[in-house]
Amino acid sequence: MMLRKATEITMADQVIRWALQAFVLLGSLLLVCSASNAAETPNDPVLQMTVGSKAFTESVILGEMLQLLTRQGGIKVEHKRQLGGTRVLWNALLSGEIHAYAEYTGTLLQEILVNEYLQGEAELRQALAARGLKMMQPLGFNNTYAIGVKTELAEQLKLRTISDLKQHPQLVFGFAAEFMDRADGWPGLKQHYQLPQENVRGLNHDLAYRGIASGAFHATDLYSTDAEIEYYNLQSLEDDLDYFPVYNAVILYRADLDERAPGVVALFKQLGSRIDASTMSKMNAQVKLNGESETAVAARFLAKTLNVSVDFQVQTSWQRFWQNTVEHLLLVIVSLSAAIVVAIPLGILAARRERLAHIVLGMSSIVQTIPSLALFVFMIPLLGIGGPPAMVALFLYSLLPIVRNTYAGLKDIPAAIVESAQALGLPSHVRLRMVELPLATRAILAGIKTSAVLNVGTATLAALIGAGGYGQPILTGIRLDDMSLILQGAVPAAALALLAQGFFELIERGLLPRTIRTKTS
Amino acid sequence: MLTFSQVSKYYGEAQALAPLDLDVATGESLLLIGPSGCGKSTLLRLIAGLIQPDSGTMTFEGELLSSENIQLIRQRMGYVIQEGGLFPHLSVQDNVTVMARYLRRDATWIDARLVELANLVQLPEALITRFPAELSGGQRQRVSLMRALMLDPDLLLLDEPLGALDPMIRYQLQQDLKAIFTQLDKTVVMVTHDIAEAAYLGHRLVLMRDGCVVQSGSFKDLCHSPVEPFVEQFIAAQRDPMARLTEVLQ
């Protein structure tokens, strides 16, 4: 007893230090890993390029072609696959986050630049040039929208044109979410044809095929090159009043590529007029119905049609799993540690100043009410696409549980204990460190655990803005209607959430002295 | 040692303490008594600087108490509250020595002082490494007293220190407190609602009601020359239980 033992305070300090060291070490290891992944550049890295694609198969195949051609041109390239929507790609192209992607003329005229009332190709090219963008010759197919119904239904109700739908107000429609909102989508279609149907629901485009096949609704929007039209035995209704514009596929790219990577631009240009509608439809079918990889399909096309033989490697599932794991862990660790570092002081501040508490708790609650997908998209104009904006969004998302629990943990300390510490003469910052924070540890850790689990789950959405992670196989799985791919993302994400929870439970065990631990258990 | 002049305190609209004058002499044991809500705890919390007066001034050893010097002056006061206010996450020894360690007192001095205090309050040394939740109520109050005495303060403030203990332990601790007060010869300001405890431990009793001092003096003064009927009533209500029983049986 004469030799004082190591006190609980110093032991707790030590455990925190170890935990933080482990955390930081893991984080920096991952950073090194991802950096070294990015560093293996072939010969002369004049420029690194990024190409993008939308979240449907055709766009991903075209994106793969661009990627293979760029690599053929000797430039290191990354393909940000299946980003979450037209706006995401367009803004990323404008800001230079991506350099090229395949777009459709109809989408440019009727959706992206609809407010400029452009007439014809010349005006469109002019409008693009004003933004530092260029458009290549059309690829050769028109992937327009169409309204599709099951062939049996069409025969039964004698449906041939979209106008025929007017006679059947009882029909239920299921449209892709994007189609529901687009200027050239359902609202315009309804008005143009004076369609009476009121029972209309929005859903994922790929799921819409299953919906119509199962009879959940009678009509859906189709892309005319979709492989499923034949597969599900659907009939597209004739656009007899010429509502849908022409959606010629074109490669959109940043004008500065002409100088910075003329070789690659020349390769891209070879694609002009080489892909007709049936070729595209077949390639879509090879991926969606035969289960081939987009890369293999794109490479075969390039070899056959352009006589460009590209060597490509399809990632093994382990490589892909490892890459997704590194990306996901990095997202979670960076955003969660930043949230811990910021949220605990915010919670302390709120507990100390009652007036600030309303502001701090209110603000973090507001952030929490923003749907997570929306929060990711909000980040794009500020930070572009990829890891950093996703980390910021996840960081914001992780704040509230930690702030609130820190605040509550400090407020819940019995007044007698706070006053005893005060009466001893301990200054405020020492009281905080030696008495109040240790007593609030359980609550704070509970907040961190909640945040960690939320964070791991929400991070799967980060794939929509090109940040990768376990969301990538989930997105691909939804797109290809492939349950095993979805599970390849969902299962590790769930396991990671449990691991994160366990990790903080271990820390809790190390931090709390035995009496506090046993009191409530 | 301690003077109050025209000190008052409000909680919102409610007056907890009417403007009040009070002197506490060095070495004196002053016992504040009175019914719940009479302001006796408020008075003690004002001395400890846990709350600030709305008017008036307080001095400690001639020094005016203010928010600037309260931090330093607190180190010359020991404070014990009803439930002890021990830190549940710290062992007995860490609870007692937390302030001394913060002040970076010599480690051998801290250890020696710990043993000395354990002996003084008759706490078995084996309990020193335990946590508060592993002690009985009486033991916790002994530890709380050790913590208050650690830096050898000039003034000891006790707010109903025995209020939550059962009668047997309470009686034992009253004896021990009396011995400690006598042995250390410290200035003590203590709050209790138990007139017998106050009479036993205090040189001087201050009886309060509704934020005002009703009468101040020895127990004898209060018994023999009460200034108003309330003093008689307050004492009568807590008379010797045997005498009370006899009265009821008659």
Image: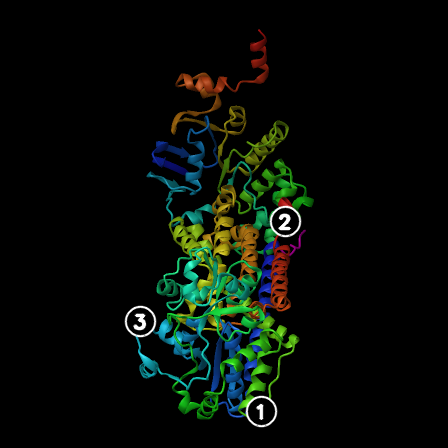
Residue at the image position 40 percent from the left and 74 percent from the top: A107
Residues packed near mark 1 inside 10 Å, few (<14), some (14 to 19) or many (20 plus): some
Q: Would you identify the image quadrant in which residue B61 lies?
A: top left
Labels 1, 2: one chain: yes
Residue B194 location (% of width, % of height): 52, 26
Q: Residue B170 occupies which quadrant of the picture?
A: top right
Task: Check if mark 1's residue and mark 2's residue have beta carbons within 8 Å.
Answer: no
Residue A361 relative to residue B8: left or right: right
SS at mark 2?
Answer: helix
Tag 1 subunit: A
- Residue type, label 2: Arg
Residue A59: image x %, image y %? 50, 77
Q: Earlier in the sequence, mark 1 or mark 2?
A: 1
**Element assignment for label 3:** helix
Check the image and report above or below for A350 versus A466.
above
Q: Mark 2 points at which residue?
A: A517
Question: Residue A120, position in %: x, y?
Answer: 33, 80
Of pointers 1 and 3, the one earlier in the residue sequence: 3
Magenta region: A1-7
Q: Is residue A424 above or below residue A397?
A: above
Residue at image mark 3? A115
Which label lies toward us, 1 or 2?
A: 1
